[in-house]
Image (spheres, rainbow, N blue to C red):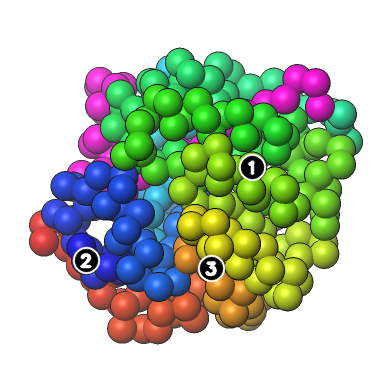
Amino acid sequence: MKRLLDCTASDFEKMTGRELKQSILASEGRTIVAEVIGAVTPYYPAVTNAEMAAAFGADLILLNFFDVFNPSMEGLTEEVPDSIVRTLKKLVGRPIGLNLEPVDLEADQVETLIKLPEGRLATENSLQKAKELGFDFVCLTGNPKTGVSNAEITKAIKMARKVFGEDGLIIAGKMHSAGVAGEVGGSLMSTETLHGFIEAGADIILIPSPGTVPGFTVEKTAKLVDIVHDKGAMAILTTGTSQEGADEATIKQIALNSKMAGADLFHVGDAGAAGMTIPENITAYSIVVRGKRHTYVRMASSILR
């Protein structure tokens, strides 16, 4: 199995979820995940945000605000909605996943919440539809003001494992409170929560990068990552508090701190430009965690390889 950072579009096309997981593991902390919103006018309308993120060095593309029952991608002309994901995968030559949100209707709120369409909720029907659309992985998480709780994420992991089977690739966790009381700042993630996610069947646990959420220092984050590794899972450290739109110096500091904390994957969120981080920040992040050699090769490699 090739390391993911060495894989070509042709390699990605043939990969199962389990093979993708093994390829990420073999890359030893040099995998970049870029989250993008396809439901808004792209940063540059001539191409989709997914294509832009891939061109600036992302290995994996994570779609946010994607409604599986009303598939659409601004910047992409596709007459058959159910073919959008597969068409996009051909254009970017990267594995593509999506966020689905396990909303907790019983959770105590810290702010007024928004109501999500059915196609963005983590239900058995939406998970099944995501599988049919051709997504390579699913991320069970919460956007701001959605009411997603850790307890509901745990339930959704079990459901996702049932739908996708043992070969599916499941990421789970929150990068901020998502409007839920008791899961704010340093209380966002606990050892018990990590154990629950992994035992429910998650392959990759989502943890805020040091410096992105109050209380998440390098030391604390490293301890959480060690717990994840001890339980046989991988950790993705996230920059999803709009700091992905910060200056490059801040991005580089977050990247290096996340590397020191033991991240297997590095996530950059969708804020800063129109539905994605500032593209140069993807490249800056990549250069910190894997150098110019792997960054430039990823950026330059043709999807025809």
Image coordinates of residue 97 in percent, x first then y, are 40, 42
Q: In which quarter of the image is residue 226?
A: bottom right
Image coordinates of residue 146 in percent, x first then y, are 71, 31
Q: Are marks 3 and 2 in contact (CB under 8 Å)?
A: no
> Is residue 95 at all visible to an observer of this figure?
yes
Dot 2 crowding, Cα within 10 Å, few <14, some 14–19, many 20+: some
* Residue bearing mark 3: 263
Magenta extent: 78-107
Q: Quadrant of residue 179?
A: top right
What amino acid type should be assigned to the residue bearing mark 2?
Lys
Res. 173 mark: none
Q: Please state which of residues 300 and 17 is positioned toward the viewer in this rendering.
A: 17
Q: Please state which of residues 232 and 143 is positioned toward the viewer in this rendering.
A: 232
Q: Residue placed at 77% from the left, 44% from the top?
A: 177
> Is residue 88 found inside the magenta-colored segment of the image?
yes
> Is residue 275 found inside the magenta-colored segment of the image?
no
Under tag 3, what secondary structure? loop
Q: Are marks 1 and 3 in contact (CB under 8 Å)?
A: no
Res. 196 mark: 1
> Up-down: is 91 above or below 278?
above
Q: Are marks 2 and 1 in contact (CB under 8 Å)?
A: no
> Is residue 70 at all visible to an observer of this figure?
no
What amino acid type should be assigned to the residue bearing mark 1?
Gly
* Residue bearing mark 2: 2
**N-term mark: 3 or 2:** 2
Image coordinates of residue 4 in percent, x first then y, are 29, 64
Q: In this view, does 107 lie to the left or right of 228?
A: right
Under tag 2, what secondary structure? loop
Dot 1 crowding, Cα within 10 Å, few <14, some 14–19, many 20+: some
What amino acid type should be assigned to the residue bearing mark 3?
Ala
Q: Residue placed at 59% from the left, 79% from the top?
A: 260
